[in-house]
Image: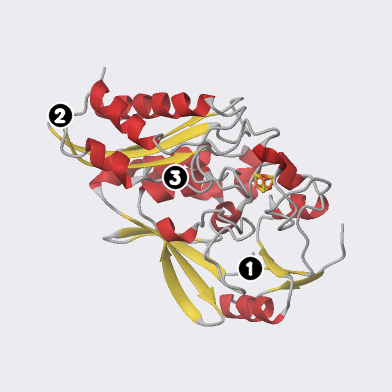
């Protein structure tokens, strides 16, 4: 592991000042992903800015929104009684993530910035355009069972790993940032970038910017929501396919719906055409199947991950069927 400097920030402004003035720096809170990557040589930093002392761990409600501080721990949010009641999809996504030990340690901000589980990315000896731009993407023709079928490019097809980000995408969350230029807010739909020709750029963060909190609108949709995660084993495993769904009906008719998908996209995957295919229609198996076909219309399956095309449609059918009482 390469040697690095270390400092403890006493305020968000100080954290940003240190990071902006120290090339090669990164923020660290729980460190449950970052330190593994650094130990394995898949990511290197010259300096870590410890943000654990910052007063950014709120889980608070006001009339219009839930505010989750970037340093709230996964467990703290997942087990919060009002989060469970008013935002079940968030609680379920968090409880389906990682292990109890990791959920005790890992912070919400870090969860949103965790890196892909692509084996080539995590192996410092492999070529990988995301880790070493221009070196190639062996996953295109190699081991790609866990990779994305939506949003990929000739340069990268890595699946986005965060369950929480998928749930937040379905709920139209906003990510709040503090940087050298001040505060700004970014809708989560615009926070994560497609890989295109620069897969090393994964999000809208500017140099020195710190995630301070995430806001989630309080709606009747959020209160009737679910997260379904399909994975290879029951715990401490990343999604093969996942669906975050929120539904509002008038009688049998879909008044409104929000859907986001994990395991299939290079970013938390939301396609408003899928929601439009359901809105205003009676929620039936046929309507769900048609929406599922819209979802995979642009899918590009590879040699080992073609099964996701059908699996994600079945997952959509299952979660909407449960939420809407469709038999
Ligand atoms: Fe790297 Fe992306 Fe290719 Fe994986 S899929 S090897 S992360 S470029």
Q: Is residue 153 left or right of residue 88?
A: right
Q: Which residue is mark 1?
A: 53
Q: Earlier in the sequence, mark 1 or mark 2?
A: 1
Q: Is residue 15 left or right of residue 205?
A: right
Mark 3 neighbour density, 10 Å: few (under 14) some (14–19) many (20 or more): many
The answer to which of 136 and 176 lies nearer the viewer is 136
Q: Is residue 63 left or right of residue 137?
A: left
Residue 200 in which image quadrant: bottom right
Secondary structure type for disc 1: loop
Q: Which residue is mark 2?
A: 252
Q: Residue at x 69, y 46 (%)?
A: 137
Q: Residue at x 29, y 53 (%)?
A: 218
Q: Is residue 131 above or below residue 94?
A: below
The answer to which of 185 and 278 lies nearer the viewer is 278
Residue 14 in which image quadrant: bottom right
Residue 206 is at least partly visible in this image: yes
Residue 49 is at least partly visible in this image: no
Q: Earlier in the sequence, mark 3 or mark 1?
A: 1
Q: Earlier in the sequence, mark 2 or mark 3?
A: 2
Could you tell me if the residues under marks 3 and 1 are in contact, i.e. CB atoms within 8 Å? no
Q: Given this view, does label 2 or label 3 mark the residue nearer the observer?
A: 3
Q: Is residue 149 above or below residue 14?
A: above
Secondary structure type for disc 3: loop
Q: Where's residue 15, x and y in %?
A: 63, 75
Q: Residue at x 47, y 64 (%)?
A: 213
Q: Which residue is mark 3?
A: 269
């Amino acid at each position: 592991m390469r040697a690095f400097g270390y400092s403890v920030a006493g305020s968000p402004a100080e954290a940003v000042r240190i990071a902006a003035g120290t090339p090669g720096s990164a923020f660290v809170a729980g460190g449950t992903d970052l330190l593994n990557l650094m130990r394995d040589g898949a990511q290197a930093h010259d300096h870590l800015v410890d943000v654990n002392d910052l007063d950014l761990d709120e889980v608070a409600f006001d009339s219009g929104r839930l505010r989750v501080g970037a340093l709230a721990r996964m467990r703290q949010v997942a087990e919060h009684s009002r989060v469970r009641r008013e935002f079940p999809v968030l609680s379920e996504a968090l409880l389906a993530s990682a292990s109890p030990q990791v959920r005790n340690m890992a912070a919400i901000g870090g969860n949103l910035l965790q890196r892909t589980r692509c084996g080539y990315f995590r192996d410092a000896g492999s070529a990988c355009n995301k880790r070493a731009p221009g070196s190639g993407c062996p996953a295109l023709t190699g081991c790609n069972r866990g990779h994305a079928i939506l949003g990929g490019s000739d340069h990268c097809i890595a699946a986005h790993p965060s369950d929480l980000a998928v749930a937040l995408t379905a709920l139209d969350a906003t990510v709040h940032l503090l940087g050298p230029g001040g505060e700004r807010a970014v809708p989560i739909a615009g926070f994560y970038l497609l890989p295109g020709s620069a897969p090393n750029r994964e999000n809208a963060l500017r140099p020195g910017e710190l995630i301070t909190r995430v806001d989630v609108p309080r709606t009747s949709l959020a209160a009737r929501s679910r997260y379904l995660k399909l994975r290879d084993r029951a715990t401490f495993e990343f999604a093969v396919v996942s669906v975050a769904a929120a539904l509002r009906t008038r009688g049998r008719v879909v008044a409104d719906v929000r859907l986001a998908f994990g395991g299939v996209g290079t970013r938390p995957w939301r396609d408003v055409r899928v929601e439009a295919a359901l809105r205003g229609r009676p929620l039936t198996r046929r309507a769900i199947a048609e929406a599922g076909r819209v979802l995979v219309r642009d899918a590009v399956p590879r040699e080992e991950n073609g099964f996701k095309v059908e699996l994600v449609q079945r997952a959509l059918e299952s979660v909407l069927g449960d939420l809407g009482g469709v038999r």
